[in-house]
Amino acid sequence: MLDPHAKRRIRIPEIIEDPWFQTDYVPSCGYICDEKIYLDDDNTAFDSVEKNDAETKIAKSSSFINAFQLIAMSHDLSGLFEEKDDEKKKTRLGSKHTVKETIKKIEAAAMGVRLSVVRTNNFKMKIHPTQKMTRCSRSYYDLSAEVIEVAPTNCVVEISKSAGELTIYKEA
């Protein structure tokens, strides 16, 4: 089937004739419709379409999730985005909240451990200690955080070291 040469490639009739394919094979006869629709009656034609739409809507479950929601259920999405860059170490986390809620939670968590947050735009922020230490101090570091929307209620938070010692960043 996947042979690029047309002369050697197997064809559909040959596949259907193969004994393996014939096991439990029932040929399709197509769709037979007993319902007669008169084209002069517009309502009848559209009623059948509405019935099909209603059946389709009922068939879809309210628990349906798309691929982004499924992936976002993971507590750690770093495996999907991880890059090997030890000089600028990045950590990525998944959030089941909107971008605004996630930013508020980051700000609240930072204030809880005496860090100040300065927004650079709607999705990026700088996080640093409220009392600036000298550059030679072992505890000096600055972090950058970016909130990336994956779906309306799911986002990824990317935290990276923007200044300071990498060993301190790893401990934090």
Image (cartoon, grey):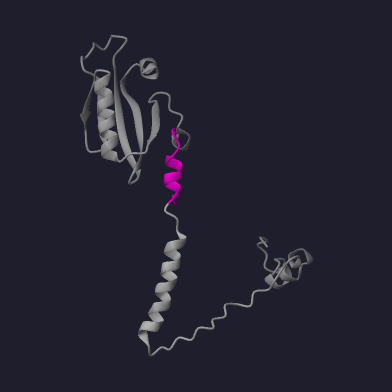
Per the image, is 130 magenta?
Answer: no
Q: Residue at x 71, y 68 (%)?
A: 25
Q: Residue at x 45, y 42 (%)?
A: 71
Compared with 38, 64 (above or below) is above
Compared with 118, 5 (above or below) is below
Residue 126 visible to the viewer: no
Q: Residue 32: x percent and y percent?
A: 57, 80
Q: Quadrant of residue 28?
A: bottom right
Residue closest to the eye, 44 or 74: 44
Per the image, is 66 magenta?
Answer: yes
Q: Residue 98: x percent and y percent?
A: 30, 41
Q: Residue at x 42, y 53 (%)?
A: 62
Q: Is residue 97 left or right of residue 130?
A: right
Q: Residue 123: x percent and y percent?
A: 26, 37
Quadrant that contains the N terminus: bottom right
**Residue ranking furthest to the top:** 137
Count of all numbered marks drawn on residues in the image? 0
- The magenta-colored residue range is 63-76
Residue 58 visible to the viewer: yes
Quadrant that contains the C terminus: top left
Q: Quadrant of residue 162?
A: top left
